[in-house]
Image (cartoon, rainbow, N blue to C red):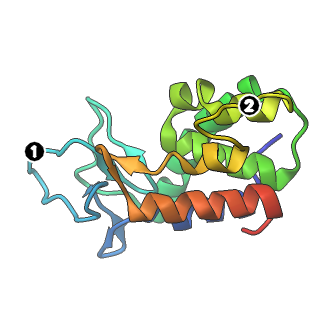
Amino acid sequence: MKVSNQGIEFLKRVEGCVIINNQHVIYDDATGQPVPTGAELPIGATIGYGHLIRRGEDFNQGLSEMAADTLLRADVAIAAHAVDNYIYMPLAQHQYDALVSLAFNIGVVNFKESTLVKYINDPKFYNSMYPNPERAWKAWNTSRGRVSRGLVNRRRAEWDMFARGIY
């Protein structure tokens, strides 16, 4: 499968971005605040739609909307590859898009090892800590050790997409 345009637009909404003078700029993912040009990058320095800046990447000049979209699609391809590799059950488009959003946000390793993947792949699976797939999904709601209101809302929106097809 491939992430739908609705899935991409959903990711843009939930990831957010910081745009100044028509350019996507570097921001602190935890606070959403722009990082001043030339300042030391904080842990979680991000640009565009949720692209965590890696060592050696230079985005001090910012990104156009087209470049931010291209970067998002490249990052989404990694998450989609994880869904393709670790989910064995057939999926509807809305389920696939929701799972890609989750994998994009929590990372490939966390996704692969998640209780949720076990639930989806094995209808007989049970875990007492997360007694159903919805609870397993919504458990991914912390950032830096604290429950994040933004992640609670995102997990609810992703679950609505997965379970009900609501984008």
Image: 110 above or below 63 = above
Residue 139 in the figure: left or right of residue 144: right
What's the amino acid at mark 2? Tyr
How far across and how far down the image is residue 118, in percent? 72, 28
Badge 1: few (under 14), some or many (20 or more) residues near its Cα, within 10 Å?
A: few
The residue that label 1 is drawn on is 40
How far across and how far down the image is residue 89, in percent? 87, 32
Judging depth in this view, the residue of 84 and 63 nearest the camera is 84
Q: Quadrant of the C terminus?
A: bottom right
- Are dots 2 and 1 in contact, CB under 8 Å? no
Residue 125 appears in view: yes
In this rendering, the label closer to the viewer, 2 or 1 = 2
Judging depth in this view, the residue of 81 and 96 nearest the camera is 96
Badge 2: few (under 14), some or many (20 or more) residues near its Cα, within 10 Å?
A: some
How far across and how far down the image is residue 18, in percent? 34, 67
Q: Residue at x 73, y 61 (%)?
A: 161
Judging depth in this view, the residue of 79 and 30 nearest the camera is 30
The residue that label 2 is drawn on is 126
